[in-house]
Amino acid sequence: MTKKQLRSLTERLLEAKSQLVRRIQRNRHDFSDSANWPVRDSGDRILECTKNNYLQGESSLLCLNLRLIEDALERITLGTYGRCSECGKPIEYKRLSAVPWARLCVNCQGREEMRDLSPPWTAAFRPSI
Ligand SMILES: [Zn+2]
């Protein structure tokens, strides 16, 4: 990945983050007295998010997305962005361009989804061949 590509992905992450934060704040405004929601920094925001998101369907999804984006931005700071956190191989730029907060390469993502679809206990019920 070139520096220019990284910069454009960073910008997209920051933009997506500010949009999410705005939407989360708007949702909160709808659900509760906004005076109860002092927003100081993003750490606070995430904490409040995880504590309070279960009652608010859309917000919980937004909070999850926000966490993924925050994680990606942290990886950029650490210099580990763009590497698969499972196998350590570089994630294709094409994939990052579609999903800038991707944490896994296509292969590992595929494996993770397979795992989700077939939890370990189903193996016990499979007839032996
Ligand atoms: Zn991988």
Image (spheres, rainbow, N blue to C red):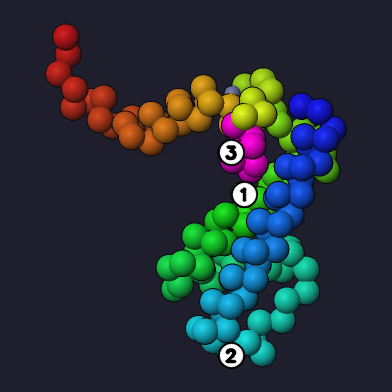
Residue to which mark 3 is pinned = 98
Q: Find disc 2 in the rendering and name its residue.
A: 33
Disc 3/disc 1 C-alpha distance (Å): 14 Å
Q: Quadrant of the N terminus?
A: top right
Residue 88 shows in the view: no
Q: Where is residue 8? Give x, y as percent.
A: 77, 42
Residue 112, above or below 16: above
- Of badges 3 and 1, nearer the viewer stands 3
Q: CA distance from mark 3 to mark 2?
A: 36 Å
Tell how many labels. Answer: 3
Q: Quadrant of residue 76?
A: top right
Q: Which class describes the residues within 10 Å of circle 3: few (<14), some (14-19), or many (20+)?
A: few
Q: Is residue 96 magenta?
A: yes
Image side of residue 117 versus residue 54, left or right: left
Mark 2–mark 1 Cα distance, whole angstroms, equals 27 Å
Please name which of the two marks, 3 or 2, marks the residue nearer to the observer: 3
The amino acid marked with disc number 1 is Leu
45 with respect to 49 (left or right):
right
Task: Please name whichever residue, 46 or 26, is drawn nearer the observer in this view of the structure.
Answer: 26
Q: Identify the residue shown where x is 63% and y is 87%.
A: 34
Figure quarter occupied by ligand 1: top right
Dot 2 falls on a residue whose secondary structure is loop
Task: Look at the picture and state if 16 lies above or below 44.
Answer: above
- Let me know if residue 78 appears in the view: yes
Q: Start and end of the magenta stretch? A: 95-103
Secondary structure found at label 3: helix
List the residue tagged with mark 1.
68
User: Image height check: is 30 above or below 5?
Assistant: below
Question: What amino acid is at disc 3?
Answer: Ala
